[in-house]
Amino acid sequence: MADVPGLVVTGASGRMGQMLVRLIGASDRARLVGAVERVGHDWVGRDIGVCMGGAPMGVLVTDDAGAAFQGAQAVIDFTAPAATVAFSALAVRAGIVHVIGTTGMEDADIAALTPGGVTIRAGNMSLGVNLLVQLTQRVAAALDADWDIEVVEAHHRMKVDAPSGTALMLGQAAAAGRGVALADVRDSGRDGITGARVRGDIGFTAIRGGDIVGEHDVIFATEGERIILRHLATDRAIFARGALRAALWGQSQPPGAYDMMDVLGL
Ligand SMILES: NC(=O)C1=CN([C@@H]2O[C@H](COP(=O)(O)OP(=O)(O)OC[C@H]3O[C@@H](n4cnc5c(N)ncnc54)[C@H](OP(=O)(O)O)[C@@H]3O)[C@@H](O)[C@H]2O)C=CC1
Ligand SMILES: O=C(O)C1=N[C@H](C(=O)O)C[C@H](O)C1
């Protein structure tokens, strides 16, 4: 196993962190060499496998990301925007691939990522959603603005950002298909006397409840008919598998900023 890439998982106690630790632990194409949590987290200093309620995995949770990255080949990072920006500098310094699943990143966060390394960032790492992004762009390109475009997403009650990263990917694809910038046509969070829909706008609606893993509809609605493109995620493993694939793919890439379309060859 020593000849397969060593991976670090940040936010190791999180929903995605634990999913990734399990996936990497069971993989024969990568090995887990680090698990990072924030300073003061009660898992720090303990074996990650035991913390997750299983057998020891021989990796102690650390709050020292810089040390964890040294000697690894990649870090898989599903945390929060400020943490991801900080991990970016440490990943480039350590010369390792940075796979970023974190969503809710503003333009300023993206601009603050440290250049010079291999960075793979996507608001959704699943094959299905990345195909849906392409379909959305094609359908939007085929239809004119008589067709209203609405993106509806649903997630679990603990999600902190809206619209979801996936919804924004889909909105950007629809805007690209139409040949417009999403920032010019984005309509999020209707409430009250909103007035009639503006022709050409792309609307976003976010539902939050229970344990919904992630659901996305792109609705194209016109007089007398509707087209709905839909992706339903029922298992977070789809995101973890995509992230592991990205970390392995990144090992043979020159420095640059990549996304899952690059990884999947779409
Ligand atoms: N791109 C994709 O395919 C997917 C993206 N996501 C995104 O991934 C992110 C995480 O989602 P999820 O796992 O559900 O969220 P969780 O809240 O369950 O996990 C986030 C983890 O990151 C930790 N964290 C936050 N800040 C730091 C820090 N400074 N240092 C170390 N650890 C830190 C949190 O610790 P603490 O609890 O102490 O705050 C927590 O353990 C979200 O942005 C989500 O939208 C999710 C699924 C798929
Ligand atoms: O927070 C989540 O859970 C998810 N986040 C991503 C997003 O914001 O789109 C991907 C997936 O939908 C799950």
Image (tube, helix red, strand yellow):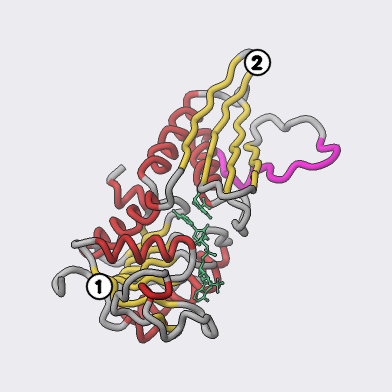
The residue where tag 2 is placed is 223
Q: Give the range drawn in magenta.
A: 180-194
Farthest top residue in view: 224
Q: What element carries label 1?
A: strand
Considering the image in quadrants, where does the N terminus appear?
A: bottom left
Where does residue 101 sit, x and y in percent of width and height? 44, 60
Q: Is residue 131 above or below residue 161?
A: above
Q: Nearer the viewer, residue 130 or 92?
A: 130
The structure residue drawn at horizontal position 51% and vertical position 64%, both measured from the top left corner, is 110
Where does residue 82 sit, x and y in percent of width and height? 55, 72
The residue where tag 1 is placed is 6
User: The disc labelled 1 sits on which kind of residue?
Assistant: Gly
Q: Is residue 258 above or below residue 217?
A: below
Is 164 situated left or right of 66 in this image? right
Considering the image in quadrants, where does the C terminus appear?
A: top left
Q: Dot 1: within a 10 Å radius of its alpha carbon, few (fewer than 14), some, or many (20 or more) residues?
A: many
Where does residue 96 sit, x and y in percent of width and height? 30, 74
Q: Nearer the viewer, residue 127 or 195?
A: 127
The structure residue drawn at horizontal position 61% and vertical position 58%, both measured from the top left corner, is 158
Q: Nearer the viewer, mark 1 or mark 2?
A: 1
Q: How far apart are marks 1 and 2 (CA)?
A: 55 Å
Farthest right residue in view: 193
Q: Earlier in the sequence, mark 1 or mark 2?
A: 1
The structure residue drawn at horizontal position 50% and vertical position 67%, both measured from the top left corner, is 79
Whether 188 is among the magenta residues is yes
User: The disc labelled 2 sits on which kind of residue?
Assistant: Glu
Where does residue 20 sit, x and y in percent of width and height? 37, 62
Q: Is mark 2 on a helix, strand or loop?
A: loop
Q: Is residue 4 above or below residue 58?
A: above
Q: Which of 195 and 11 is in front in this view?
A: 11
User: Which disc number belongs to residue 191?
Assistant: none
Is 4 situated left or right of 162 in this image? left
